[in-house]
Image (tube, helix red, strand yellow):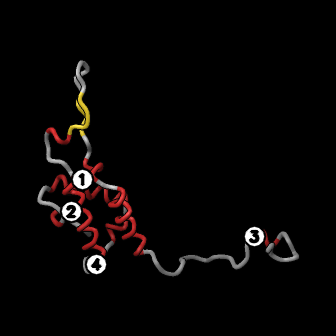
Amino acid sequence: MITPAEISSDENLARRILVRARSIAPCLNSIPDDDDRKLDAIAILKGVIAEVPAPGARRVRSRGRNGTSISYNDPGGAFSDDDIMSLRSLCDAASVGLPIGSFPAARPLAREWVEGEYS
């Protein structure tokens, strides 16, 4: 399991990024410590954290005037499409193998046509 200390010295930010990453790629919780996919995930998450702006004015997304409102970018916005696809690919790599479960040899519709399957 990836810990916040492995990706950043800012524990709160690391926890927020990890929560978002686990919603993108749930397999992050089950990657063994000796697996190379863990090192890949840590590298991706460190890159995401590097993209998070520092606290202050750089995190401001929009400002209001008379309504006096300020909205901030969330840390989840630091995930690029490439980061999301890369994290998901780590989970896909774990599920490569034979299908799990029982699959019928014939489709249910084949029982309706006694002549055989449609070709």
Q: What whole-number distance in Å separates the C-alpha atoms at marks 3 and 2? A: 49 Å
Query: Which is nearer the N-term, disc 1 or disc 3?
Result: 1
Foreground mark, 3 or 4?
4
Toward the left, the furthest residue is 9
Foreground mark, 1 or 4?
4
Q: What amino acid type is highlighted by mark number 4?
A: Asp
Q: What amino acid type is highlighted by mark number 2?
A: Lys
Query: Which is nearer the N-term, disc 3 or disc 2?
Result: 2
Q: What whole-number distance in Å separates the C-alpha atoms at marks 1 and 2? A: 13 Å
Residue 92: image quadrant is bottom left
Residue 19 in view in this figure: yes
Q: Is residue 11 above or below residue 101?
A: above
Q: What whole-number distance in Å separates the C-alpha atoms at marks 1 and 3? A: 47 Å
Q: Element type at marker 1?
A: helix
Residue 81: image quadrant is bottom left
The circle drawn on residue 46 is 2
Q: Element type at marker 4?
A: helix
